[in-house]
Amino acid sequence: MFGDKAPDPLAEQPEDQLAQNDPESAGQTEVFEWHGPVMAKTDSSMTLPWILADRVERTPHGTLIEVRNSLGRGWRRVSAKDFAADVMSTARGLVGLGLQPGDSVGIMAHTSYEWTLLDFAAWSAGLVPVPIYETSSSEQISWIVSDANVRMVITENATMRRLVRASVEKDQLIDVLALDDSGIVRIKEAGREVAQAVVEERSAALNTDSLATIIYTSGTTGRPKGAELTHGNFTILAMNGHEWMPDVAKGRDSRLLLFLPLAHVYARFLQIFQISGGGVLGHTPNVKSLLDDLASFRPSYLLAVPRVLEKIYNSAEAQAAASGTKSRIFRWAVRTAIAYSQALDTEEGPSKTLVSQHLLADRLLYSKIRHLLGGNVKMVISGGGPLGLRLGHFYRGAGLQVLEGYGLTECLIASVNTTRLSKIGTIGPPISTVAFKISDEGEILIKGPSVMRAYRNNDKANEEAFTEDGWFRTGDIGSLDVDGYVRITGRAKELIVTAGGKNVAPAVLEDPLRGHPLISQVVVVGDKRPFIAALITLDSEMLPMWLQNHGLPNMDVAQAARHPEVLEALDRAVDRANAQVSRAESIRKIKVLVTDFTEDNGLLTPSMKVKRPNVLATFKAEIDEIYGGPVERGH
C-alpha cells in the first residue's frame, strides 16, 4: 500500500527541484510593472467609523464578534448593533477623559475583544490609536509615546501600566489605565455626561485622508520609524479586497480567529477586513489555549506566519516518528500530498491512482491536521516570510490552501495568492488597487492607496523611502512574471558580497533551513569573507522529541549542539539547502549556537524577524572563529 506504487518521493527533493517540476515557475517571461485593478467604488466619506456603521446598517442583529466566555466555556455572541453601542459608550468616555480630535492613544495589550473595541472607539472619537508591543522595552515605549505625542495609554495589566509610567515623563500623559483593573469601565464612566452627538460630530469630520494610526516598524535596524496610515489606507483596500477575494470574508459564513498580535499591521488590517465583510471575528489572547479555541470557534480561515505552519508539520512528523509504521505512513502521505498538489497545476490533473491514494491519505493524516485547526478552515493567509515550495504543496495537497502574501508596516497587505489561482513559491499578484514595479536594480517598488502617507517626524527617511515619481521602495529584491505574480529573493540591505565578489541573498538559504525540526533560527554570514557560512540555533521545543525518535538520550541545547548525530542531521539539511544555489553561494561551514534569538536578548523583533546587525555584533567572535580570524584590512 505504501510501497512501489506510491508517488515519487518529492518530499525528499530539494526546493529547486520542486521548482523545476512546478509548471507555474518554469518558462515564464519576466515583466517589470503590474497594476492590480480597481474593483470597488469608494469616496472620501468611507472612513473606519463608516465601516462599522455600514455593517450595522447591513446586518444590525447578525453576529459580528464572538467573545470567549470568562470561564472558557463557549463563546458569547455580540451583534453588530451591540458592538456599535459598546463602541459609542467607550468613545464618549475617551472624549470625557479630555482627549481632543487628533490626539494619540497608546494600546499595549493582548489580541482581544477589548483591543478591537478601543480601536473603533478611538476612531469614532477622532483619535489616533498607536499600538505598542507587549514586549516593548522601556526605551522603546518612551520613544513611541514621545514621537507619536501619545496622550493616554491603555495597557493589558498593572505590570505594563507600571512600566509605561516609569518610561514616560509624568506630565506627558493624561492617564495610564489597565484592562485588568477595570480600564474599560473607567473609560465609560468618564463619558456619562458626554452627548452621543459629540462623538458623531467627530466621526463625521473624518475623511479617507485623516490619520488613522501610527504603527512603528519592528526595527531590525536602528530606532523604529512610525508609519502614518490613513483611514483610506484601510478602507479602500478592504472594500476592494472583498471584490478581489469575495470567498474570504465577504460572506456571512466567514469566521476569522485572530491570534497574531494586533500591534502588528498584518492582524490589524484583517481585523478591519473581517468587520467590513459579512462574517464573524474572534480573538485568542493566549496562544496556550489556541487549539481549544480553534476547536470551539471553528474558523473558516486563519492568519499565520510560516513558523506556525512549520511547527504544525514538524510536530506531526515527530509524533509519527515515534512508531515505525506511523512514520512510513506519514512519509507516504506527505509524498502523496505534494504529488497531488503538483498534479493540480498540470493540464492532465491527478491520475486515478493518485486520486485513490490521496483519498486514503486524507483519512489517515490530512483530516487529522485539518481537525487540529478546527475542522472548518478552508485557507490560511500566510505572511512575514516565505513558506517554501515543499510545505506549500504539502498543505494544498492536504486540503488546506495556504495563500502566501506580502505586506509591510508601510503598505499593509500589498499582494496575495488567490483561491482562483495560487502559484506556490510566489507572494501572489498585486491586490486590487496596488501596483508593483521592479526597478533597474531589481528592487520591488509599490504604489497605491495601501501605501502610508509618510514616516512620522522623519524627513530623511521619507526622502529615502520614495522615488521621485512616488513609488515606495520596499527594500526587497524580486521579480514579476507575465501573470503579475511576484517572487522575492531577498532584502537589498542583507545582500552578502563575498571576498571573491559573489553576491549572495541569505534568504534563499535561510528560509528552507528554518523548516527543519531541529532548527529555530539561521543567519547566513560571509560578507567580505572567502566563503559562505551559517549561524544556527536549535529549537528547544522540538529537540526532546527529535532525540527520542532518533534513539538518543535526552540532552540540553548545549549538549545537542556538540553531538555528532545532531550535527550530521544539520549537515544533511544544509546539503539540501545548498542544492538550490551554485557552489560559490553554498554554505561551507556552520556554527551551532547555544543561545537562541529572542526579543529579550535583542536579537528578534516583536514580529519575530531576526535583527541581523545585532546577531553579527553579538556573535562576532564565533564568526571570526569560523574563518580563522577577523576580516582582513583592505576588504
Image (cartoon, helix red, strand yellow):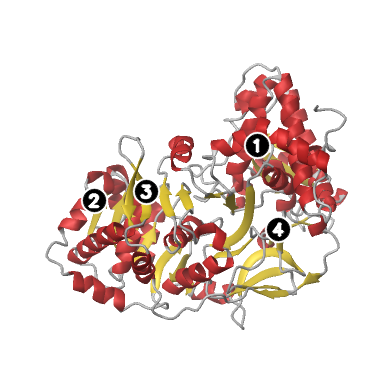
- Where residue 89 appears, as percent x and y from the top left, is 22, 61
Give me the C-alpha separation between circle 1 and circle 4: 24 Å
Residue at the image position 43 percent from the left and 36 percent from the top: 289
Q: Which mark is residue 158?
A: none
> From this viewpoint, which residue is outermost toward the bottom?
469
Q: Label 2 crowding class (10 Å Cα cut-off): few <14, some 14-19, many 20+?
A: some
Identify the residue position indicated by label 3 in the image: 66
Quarter-of-image position of residue 226: bottom left
- Where residue 237 appears, as percent x and y from the top left, is 51, 70
Q: Label 1 crowding class (10 Å Cα cut-off): few <14, some 14-19, many 20+?
A: many
Secondary structure of residue under mark 3: strand
Which marked residue is nearer to the observer: mark 2 or mark 3? 3
Identify the residue position indicated by label 4 in the image: 426
Secondary structure of residue under mark 2: helix
Q: Taking the image as drawn, is residue 588 in sight?
A: no
Give me the C-alpha separation between circle 4 and circle 2: 44 Å
Quarter-of-image position of residue 474: bottom right
Q: How many marks?
A: 4
Disc nearer the start of the sequence (3/1): 3
**Identity, as a three-letter code, of the amino acid under mark 3:** Glu
